[in-house]
Image (cartoon, rainbow, N blue to C red):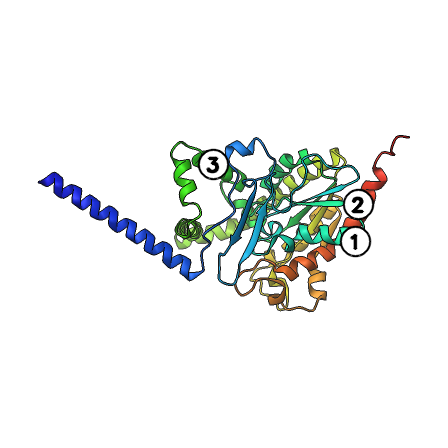
Amino acid sequence: MRARKTFLVFCFAALLLAVTAVASELALRISGHISTASIHAISDTDFVRVPGMFEPSQSVEETPHPKLHYHATINSLGYRGPEVERIRPPHVVRILCLGDSGTFGQFVNDDETLSANLERMLRQEGHFVEVINGGVPGTTIVDQVEILQRSLSLAPDIVILTFSENDIADLEAEPSQFAALAENRRVKGQTGLKTVYELVRDTALFNYLLKVRATWKTYSAPQGSTAEVRASHEGSDTRHERLWTTYSHHLDAMRQTLSSRNIRMIFNGYPTHQRIGADTFTDDRSRVQLSRAEALARNMGIPTVSLLPSFRETGLAKEELYHLPYDGHANKMGYLVQAQALLPIVRESIQAVRNSAPAPRS
């Protein structure tokens, strides 16, 4: 009798859990605030087969917010955007864009990203180019050096690295995004877990739990005592300078890697919306970090574009350049302005590539 009662309790609990899960899934879908589909990171099997960081051949309509719907396509090589051949076609100048979610094009459609705008503008001018979107959300320059190494097999002629203003602070994250994605590949590749993951990964409930987990990690760090907080502030300058040293080291490593292969590099300084209109920075370190990054790149001899003057010259409000008030990423107008600002220096780089190309044999 006791065993039967235990069994019935277990069945009731399982049924209650199932009903709760279904009800939660429906509620989240109706709310429109959580995607029921998302771009998936690459698996271990594909990681050794293709150079990109995303599961190949995806086409997803993401709906993370009722006001932020967008379509994203991943090609067969694991990059966002249209198909490209692994071997660069003759007479084509290949441009690789590296960066985080701002390069990937979070919350804009495939044809509205920085890479798509650049390619369209350059082709309209008669240039034979391919612009590959190598952006991966959540990455820093530490990860982007790794992504570059994987992408060198595509033989890019020009690499555009975009500096986003969260790049320095994000260097404190442990593990790095590249390492975290490696762990993700390991876990979801385990027997049993792979099947479960593939069943739940495109549900609103699963994506909601991922969002909750990320928020919890951000805000659950202990605040410490008054003395600990004071000591933390006293050491913050040292930690901040250490992060800049890390950034400088990896930027120079990227520069040297590209220079050794005669690949041209462009540094793209992307401003936060806090620089448009009234200055809303609360500390001087944040206020100068964009100009500091641009100066660092210039001192290394890297051709550098500062987007801030171009953004300001439009006369547009920050709400017209970014997804405000819903999100701080650039909207389609912001990406269009970026591409236009980059055009002159990209044209020069294309011409330099053409001039350095060996003459065809007679």
Quadrant of the image occupied by residue 178 = top right
Amino acid carrying label 3: it is Glu
Q: Residue at x 53, y 65 (%)?
A: 325
Residue nearer the viewer, 312 or 58: 58
Q: Give the residue pinned by disc 3.
A: 183
SS of the residue under disc 2: helix
Residue 292 lies left or right of residue 28; in this view the side is right
Residue 162 lies left or right of residue 89; in this view the side is left
Q: Are marks 3 and 1 in contact (CB under 8 Å)?
A: no
Where does the image place residue 54, in percent across and percent down from the top left?
Answer: 55, 41
Amino acid carrying label 2: it is Ile
Q: Residues within 10 Å of mark 1 (few under 14, many from 20)?
A: few
Amino acid carrying label 1: it is Pro
Q: Give the residue pinned by disc 2.
A: 350
Among the two numbered marks 2 and 3 on one chain, the one whose residue lies closer to the N terminus: 3
Q: Give the residue pinned by disc 1.
A: 344
Quadrant of the image occupied by residue 96 = top right
Residue 285 lies left or right of residue 258; in this view the side is left
Q: Is residue 208 above or below residue 318?
A: above
Residue nearer the viewer, 171 or 214: 214
Label 3 to label 1: alpha-carbon separation: 41 Å
The answer to whether one can see residue 154 in this image is yes
Where does the image place residue 46, in percent across and percent down from the top left?
Answer: 54, 34
Quadrant showing the C terminus: top right
SS of the residue under disc 1: helix
Q: Residues within 10 Å of mark 3 (few under 14, many from 20)?
A: some
Label 1 to label 2: alpha-carbon separation: 10 Å
Where does the image place residue 159, in percent across and percent down from the top left?
Answer: 70, 43
SS of the residue under disc 3: helix
The answer to whether one can see residue 239 in this image is no
